[in-house]
């Protein structure tokens, strides 16, 4: 009986199980190699995981301040950096895994879930399991996915790939059913998408917006579809509102404003096959090819669309126009001709690298892959299997450790001294830049006569006692950022952070006598409002569930 039930389950879910199975193939070496594949960003994500874990276990939530980085002066790293991958990896550390293992597994989880969600979305969208399987395979084995995951180790972007299809799955279910549970799914998935990366999530949000316009089907669905996306924005406001509004306190835009200029991939390189991942076709160390089969899917789709005698705007035509719109817009912004927009739109410059928009192309060409099944030749079982196999193995060289491997001393990364950024994204404008040495003492008397003792520190709170013989001025060797407060005997005292001798550090006065000092990082009014928006939205969504769960909206 159990065997029969298992057999029935496998047959009923064979395509989904196959997606799960083949998703392991590219990551076998990555997961089970005792060393760490050398990647562009892996060696900065590992200390960030450690810093996030420390902050989380200290009670910071949302996590914003990384206290141990920057030679102990700290930095508001997580006020600007995406949330999802660091939270997941911290949970893995919490259950006993090391930093490297947590890093590897977190990346793999994103990849595995992206395949599952893409299959579930495509199955609902196309109402055909075979088409859904083909779309999911193209999505999973788009070569740039491996550039992001294994060459770059872009910790946040890989989770944007995960939640994009989940948003579309929720929207598609809602368009078909009108049920609140599906509105809820689309809203929560949108929130998760936004907190997964600070630029690609924006591009993918645009994809979701266009999806609603193309496929809602009627005005009611369009209104509720857009409302679900807006609700997701509210859910994630605790992250993106401070990240945008407090960006002006950093050097990020100053140092990153011209990066895009050297990262436009030559147009022809997008279409030239690079099966062996040859560096000759790289742009600034990045392989920027669409790939053989994605290019074939585009060409086939164009051919089939223009071969039609009647250009009715049916489902297939809308699918083609939707996908082609995404591809054309993405390629346009990956070319120097779009330089005017990059130069004048600061939000666009947050993408840093124009070739990042290949991720949008990867999604679009995956949808176009269904057109292979409009050709009778590809419907044949053996031909279909061969197509799947070729799509998979054509990416073989992309999931190899082309940059070598690293032996990691995790103790070093638990106490990492540097700041983990490349372009001053979180360097505070009042400081003199990244620190170069640890301070000799965490707190010093810089004026008057006194002594500091019983120093105790967490990531966001510092407590110590002061015995001041005279009125004194102290410097707490912590970078100032809005949210830091100083309390002397539980009373807030003014902070100075522009002393030319202690640029960007917290200095404050303490009167003569014995005192208890607390230096604490708190939420500002703006952050509290953002947190409140997220919390109230979540509470309302949950509160409405019992009322609407069995009814159409």
Image (cartoon, rainbow, N blue to C red):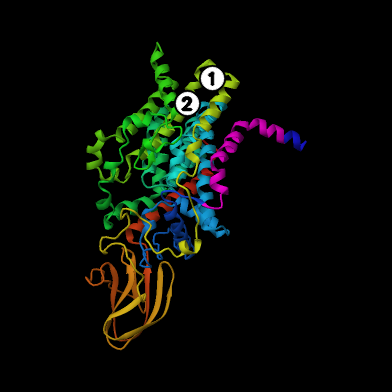
- Assess whether mark 1 and mark 2 are in contact (beta carbons under 8 angstroms): no
Q: Secondary structure at mark 1?
A: helix
Residue located 34% across and 51% down the image = 241
User: In this picture, which residue range is highlighted in magenta?
Assistant: 6-35
Q: Secondary structure at mark 2?
A: helix
Circle 2 sits on which residue? 369
- Which percent across, then down, holds residue 152? 42, 46
Of labels 2 and 1, earlier in sequence is: 2
1, 280: nearer the viewer: 280
Figure disc tally: 2
Q: Quadrant of residue 209?
A: top left
Residue located 30% across and 32% down the image = 332
- Which percent across, then down, holds residue 483? 33, 64
Quadrant that contains the N terminus: top right
Residue extending furthest toward the top: 309
Circle 1 sits on which residue? 378
Q: Is residue 543 magenta?
A: no
Task: Answer yes or no: is residue 417 visible.
Answer: yes
Q: Quadrant of residue 11?
A: top right
Residue located 49% across and 64% down the image = 411
The overriding secondary structure of the stretch rendered in magenta is helix
Task: Answer yes or no: is residue 539 visible.
Answer: no
Q: Is residue 305 above or below residue 137?
A: above
């Amino acid at each position: 009986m159990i065997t029969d039930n298992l057999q029935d389950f496998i047959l009923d879910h064979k395509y989904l199980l196959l997606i799960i199975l083949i998703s392991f193939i590219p990551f076998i070496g990555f997961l089970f190699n005792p060393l760490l594949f050398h990647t562009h960003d892996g060696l900065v994500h590992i200390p960030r995981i450690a810093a996030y874990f420390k902050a989380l276990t200290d009670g910071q939530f949302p996590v914003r301040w990384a206290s141990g980085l920057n030679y102990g002066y700290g930095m508001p790293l997580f006020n600007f950096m995406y949330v999802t991958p660091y939270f997941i990896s911290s949970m893995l550390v919490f259950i006993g895994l090391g930093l490297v293992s947590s890093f590897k597994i977190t990346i793999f989880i994103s990849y595995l879930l992206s395949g599952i969600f893409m299959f579930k979305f495509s199955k609902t969208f196309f109402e055909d399991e075979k088409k859904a399987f083909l779309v999911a395979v193209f999505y999973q084995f788009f070569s740039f996915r491996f550039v992001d995951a294994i060459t770059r180790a872009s910790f946040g972007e890989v989770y944007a790939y995960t939640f994009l299809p989940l948003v579309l799955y929720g929207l598609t279910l809602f368009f078909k059913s009108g049920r609140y549970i599906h509105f809820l799914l689309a809203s929560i998935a949108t929130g998760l998408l936004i907190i997964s990366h600070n630029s690609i999530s924006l591009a993918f949000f645009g994809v979701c917006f266009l999806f609603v316009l193309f496929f809602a089907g009627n005005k009611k669905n369009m209104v509720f579809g857009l409302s679900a996306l807006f609700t997701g924005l509210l859910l994630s406001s605790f992250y993106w509102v401070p990240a945008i509004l407090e960006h002006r306190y950093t050097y990020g835009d100053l140092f990153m404003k011209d990066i895009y200029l050297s990262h436009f991939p030559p147009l022809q390189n997008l279409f030239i096959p690079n099966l062996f991942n040859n560096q000759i076709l790289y742009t600034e160390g990045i392989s920027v090819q669409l790939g053989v089969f994605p290019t074939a899917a585009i060409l086939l789709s164009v051919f089939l669309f223009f071969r039609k005698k009647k250009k009715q705007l049916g489902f297939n035509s809308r699918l083609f126009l939707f996908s082609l719109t995404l591809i054309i817009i993405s390629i346009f912004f990956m070319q120097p001709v779009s330089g005017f927009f990059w130069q004048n739109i600061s939000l666009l410059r947050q993408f840093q690298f124009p070739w990042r928009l290949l991720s949008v192309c990867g999604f679009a060409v995956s949808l176009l892959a269904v057109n292979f099944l409009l050709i009778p030749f590809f419907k044949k079982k053996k031909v279909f299997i061969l197509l799947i196999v070729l799509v998979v193995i054509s990416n073989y060289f992309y999931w190899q450790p082309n940059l070598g491997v690293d032996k990691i001393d995790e103790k070093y990364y638990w106490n990492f001294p540097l700041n983990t950024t490349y372009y001053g994204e979180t360097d505070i404008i009042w400081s003199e830049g990244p620190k170069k040495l640890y301070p000799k003492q965490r707190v010093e008397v810089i004026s008057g006569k006194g002594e500091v003792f019983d120093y105790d520190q967490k990531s966001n709170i510092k407590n110590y006692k002061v015995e001041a013989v005279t009125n004194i001025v102290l410097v707490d060797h912590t970078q100032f950022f809005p949210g830091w407060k100083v309390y002397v005997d539980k009373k807030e005292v003014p902070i100075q952070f522009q002393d030319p001798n202690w640029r960007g550090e917290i200095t404050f006065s303490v009167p003569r006598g014995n005192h208890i000092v607390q230096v604490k990082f708190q939420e500002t009014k703006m952050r509290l409002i953002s947190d409140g928006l997220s919390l109230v939205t979540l509470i309302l969504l949950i509160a409405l569930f019992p009322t609407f769960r069995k009814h159409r909206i």
